[in-house]
């Protein structure tokens, strides 16, 4: 929160009972008036020889990372990028993604972050919605961009390749395995290869640093928003730099050099804000994980003796079942964080016991947030917790519970809509002024509050309790699937009256997608109809989001709240069946 906002809050006597349980965490922080790149650059000057990130065994220091960002920024200028341009990045967690992200920021452009496994139609939507002039992706995703290139306005497609970021021995092994699976790209394809792109930068000797401020747009992330419709969320340099300060302040055990297992993807606020940027502005080390599986997660955690891990509840459920974790020594852990969905009391108890049995001296700390404020804005304190609580607000962040659909604050202990205000709150939704006004409201206290649409309560000490997420989320193979978005696609089909999508437990993918469909009168509920719908879905959504099954139902809830309750009941019932089957 800026000094002006903090002053408004103090003069308006905004209630903040959680300050009494902050411990050594300061209630207010000083945030740098600079860009994201400048914050990373300052860190690189302080810790030049520290390892910034590790990728498939190859380490890169802060000094080397800063030099690579500098070269990439010069290459962007040589290729024609100007301040204010938007560049779409469709990349997994790899070195080129980190370098390009900060280079885009350095030249004053905006990084439009999207899922690399998005379908062709989704990519086309993201490019048009953002008005991107460039796209950056891996060679293995090139054919998706080429398929829709005639429908969009792209000056250039820059193609990176995983082997370029590997040491020679690892590169040989990669090409003999993963490399063989990739489709060949024509030699005359109208693209810029990564190394060719960087060569342009070596020949560029003019000004490339843009004059940008903390409050300028820097990143666009996509989410269902508080209404479930896909929207671009405009975030600033301040939003990310403030989050970095808050993460470190609420984790006083952190020390420069501590290792974060960066498995959450960069195109998601959780991965980009917590696992990448917060580390790189604080001297931390990111263990970059390009593709998630519970097995690879456990392997890297043990190999690098990571100090910090963050994930969703289904990840921790999966770790409990992995044989290689049976005799693991987890004494290296300083922080284990859960977010993205509600962590059940029962799962928390089981994982806390698991940590204790494996020599860790900490417990899982649950948090809460949403992409409208980058990611986390509330976290269980390091020294105290309350059963069922998602913790207390970050420094300079305020929470209140109001009657749903109003700005009227309810008494402590009463359930209502969760609202929050602070320095990480978005600029707004891209091209959606009405929904921005609906979500981001100025209250009588003079502060701008995000109306999350989520239900919860707060106790007299300021601990927040999450009750129900109206915009529920499925996590499959480490990626987020929003049921409401899937339902919008299904409901648009001429055969469908209404649909409801849920997440089903899966030992390998964490969750898999299942759809319930009520057909229009007269449409037969048979395998032929199911095949038609599956073919339609394949054309419109990414592979990771495809439902493994469509089940026809005669009736479905007609309201949003009714659908949420239906999803919860179906998920719980299928989870019980899954657990029973495993026990047998």
Image (tube, grey):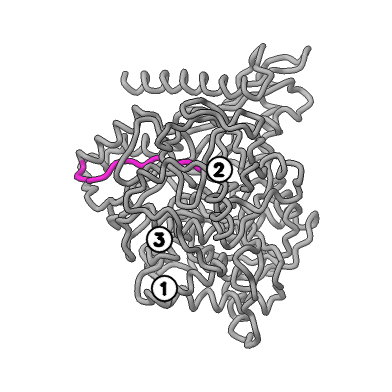
Task: Compare residues 397 and 485 and report the one nearer the observer.
Answer: 397
Label 3, residues with CA under 10 Å away: few <14, some 14-19, many ≥20? many
Mark 2 vs mark 1: which is more N-terminal?
1
Q: Is residue 569 above or below residue 411?
A: above
Magenta segment range?
358-369
**Percent coordinates x, y for residue 189 in the rendering:** 70, 66
Say the numbered circle drawn on residue 20: none
Looking at the rendering, in which quadrant would you find the C terminus? top left
SS for dot 2 = strand
Q: Is residue 208 above or below residue 462?
A: below
Q: Is residue 218 above or below residue 358?
A: below
Q: Which residue is mark 3?
A: 286
Q: Is residue 306 above or below residue 172?
A: above
Distance from the alpha carbon under mark 2 to that under mark 1: 35 Å
Distance from the alpha carbon under mark 1 to that under mark 3: 11 Å
Q: Seen in the image, is 167 located left or right of residue 221?
A: left
Q: Which residue is mark 2?
A: 420
Label 2, residues with CA under 10 Å away: few <14, some 14-19, many ≥20? many
Q: Which residue is mark 1?
A: 62
Mark 2 vs mark 3: which is more N-terminal?
3
Q: Residue at x 72, y 27 (%)?
A: 491
Q: Answer with the quarter of the image where residue 435 lies.
A: top right
Distance from the alpha carbon under mark 2 to that under mark 3: 29 Å
Q: Is residue 435 visible?
A: yes
Q: Residue at x 57, y 19 (%)?
A: 566
**Percent coordinates x, y for residue 106 in the rendering:** 59, 72
């Amino acid at each position: 929160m800026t000094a002006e906002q903090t002053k408004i809050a103090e003069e308006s006597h905004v209630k903040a009972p959680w300050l009494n349980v902050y411990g050594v965490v300061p209630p207010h922080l000083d945030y740098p008036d600079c860009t994201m790149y400048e914050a990373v650059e300052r860190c690189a000057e302080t810790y030049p020889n520290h390892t910034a990130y590790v990728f498939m065994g190859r380490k890169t220091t802060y000094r080397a990372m800063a030099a690579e960002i500098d070269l990439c920024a010069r290459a962007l200028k040589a290729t024609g990028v100007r301040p204010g341009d938007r560049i779409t990045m469709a990349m997994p967690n790899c070195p080129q993604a980190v370098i390009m992200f900060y280079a885009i920021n350095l030249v004053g452009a905006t990084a439009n972050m999207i899922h690399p496994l998005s379908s062709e139609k989704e990519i086309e939507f993201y490019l048009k919605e953002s008005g991107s002039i460039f796209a950056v992706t891996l060679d293995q995703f090139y054919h998706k961009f080429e398929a829709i290139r005639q429908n969009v306005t792209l000056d250039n497609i820059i193609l990176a390749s995983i082997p370029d970021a590997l040491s020679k021995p690892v590169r040989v092994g990669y090409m003999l395995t993963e490399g063989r699976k990739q489709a060949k790209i024509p030699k005359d394809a109208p693209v810029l290869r990564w190394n060719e792109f960087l060569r342009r930068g070596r020949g560029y000797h003019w000004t490339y640093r843009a004059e940008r401020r903390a409050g300028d747009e820097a990143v666009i992330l996509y989410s269902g928003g508080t209404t479930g419709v896909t929207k671009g969320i405009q975030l600033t340099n301040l939003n990310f730099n403030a989050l970095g300060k808050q993460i470190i302040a609420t984790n006083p055990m952190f020390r420069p050099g501590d290792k974060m297992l960066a498995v959450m993807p960069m195109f998601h606020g959780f991965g980009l804000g917590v696992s990448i940027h917060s580390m790189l502005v604080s001297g931390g080390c990111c263990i970059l994980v390009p593709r998630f599986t519970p097995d690879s997660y456990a392997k890297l955690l043990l190999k690098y003796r990571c100090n910090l891990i963050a994930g969703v509840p289904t990840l921790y459920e999966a770790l409990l079942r992995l044989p290689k974790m049976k005799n693991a020594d987890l004494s290296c852990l300083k922080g284990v964080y859960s977010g993205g969905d509600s962590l059940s009391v029962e799962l928390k108890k089981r994982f806390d016991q698991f940590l204790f049995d494996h020599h860790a001296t900490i417990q899982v700390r649950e948090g809460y947030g949403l992409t409208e404020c980058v990611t986390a804005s509330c976290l269980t304190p390091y020294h105290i917790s309350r059963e069922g609580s998602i913790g207390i607000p970050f420094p300079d962040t305020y929470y209140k519970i109001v009657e749903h659909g109003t700005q009227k604050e309810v008494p402590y202990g009463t359930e209502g809509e969760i609202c929050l205000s602070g320095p990480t709150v978005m600029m707004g939704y891209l091209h959606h002024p009405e929904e921005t006004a609906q979500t981001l409201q100025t209250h009588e206290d003079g502060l701008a509050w995000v109306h999350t649409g989520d239900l919860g309560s707060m106790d007299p000490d300021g601990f927040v309790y999450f009750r129900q997420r109206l915009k529920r989320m499925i996590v499959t193979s480490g990626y987020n699937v929003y049921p409401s978005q899937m339902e919008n696609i299904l409901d648009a089909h001429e055969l469908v009256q209404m649909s409801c999508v849920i997440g089903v437990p899966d030992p390998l993918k964490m969750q898999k997608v299942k759809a319930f469909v009520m057909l229009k009168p007269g449409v037969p509920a048979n395998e032929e109809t199911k095949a038609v719908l599956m073919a339609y879905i394949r054309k419109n959504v990414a592979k990771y989001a495809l439902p493994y099954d469509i089940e026809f139902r005669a009736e479905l809830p007609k309201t949003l709240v009714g659908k949420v309750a239906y999803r919860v009941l179906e998920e719980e019932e299928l989870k019980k069946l899954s657990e029973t089957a495993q026990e047998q």
